[in-house]
Image: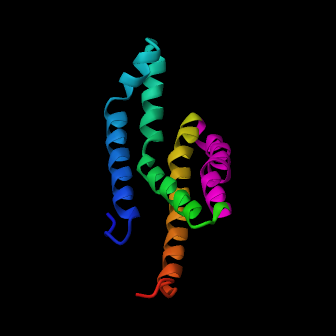
């Protein structure tokens, strides 16, 4: 997925790997999770559908977490804060309001992976931009 270009590469690979495994479990066994809390068959069935839709883009969340951490580490707290709020406030709430009008409850569930995807794309764009900026700078410590 990503080349070994820096210390963040193994972290990103690990986070994406763990998220993909959890996603697979949630997708294959969603009734198990809801069966812990309720025995109502209708609730479990609707919960299974919701969970399958909501976990479609969870593997991207790791990219978002690492990106915000990178921005904090390089002293760009404002960028980090804005990126961390993008998923929930800038993308999720408007998508829930918009998609629920057209797709009812399925639109609410669909808003979660779409907001993850949109936030992930924004995070990747800004990380690549920052990476290119640092690549163009001279080494602060001469060899």
Residue at x-position 58% and y-position 39%: 108
Measuring from the top left, give residue 142's x and y in whole percent.
45, 88
Quarter-of-image position of residue 41: top left
Residue at x-position 46% and y-position 12%: 40
- Does the magenta-highlighted stretch encompass residue 87? yes
Query: Is 31 placed left or right of 117 in the picture?
Result: left
- Does the magenta-highlighted stretch encompass residue 69? no
Quarter in which the N terminus is drawn: bottom left
Viewer-closest of 39 and 67: 67
Residue at x-position 49% and y-position 75%: 131
Query: Is 7 placed left or right of 139 in the picture?
Result: left
**Image position of 82 with respect to 17: above or below:** below
Measuring from the top left, give residue 133's x and y in whole percent.
53, 81
Colour treatment of the image: rainbow
- Where are the magenta residues, as a range? 78-104
Measuring from the top left, give residue 124's x and y in whole percent.
49, 66
């Amino acid at each position: 997925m990503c080349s070994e270009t820096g210390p963040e590469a193994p972290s990103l690979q690990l986070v994406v790997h763990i998220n993909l495994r959890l996603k697979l479990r949630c997708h294959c066994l969603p009734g198990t999770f809801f069966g812990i809390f309720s025995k109502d068959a209708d609730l479990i069935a609707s919960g299974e559908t919701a969970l399958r839709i909501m976990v479609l883009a969870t593997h991207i969340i790791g990219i978002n977490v690492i990106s915000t951490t990178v921005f904090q580490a390089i002293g760009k707290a404002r960028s980090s804060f804005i990126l961390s709020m993008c998923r929930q406030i800038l993308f999720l709430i408007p998508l829930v309001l918009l998609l629920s009008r057209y797709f009812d409850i399925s639109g609410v569930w669909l808003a979660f992976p779409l907001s993850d995807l949109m936030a992930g794309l924004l995070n990747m764009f800004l990380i690549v931009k920052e990476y290119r900026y640092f690549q163009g700078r001279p080494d602060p410590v001469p060899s």
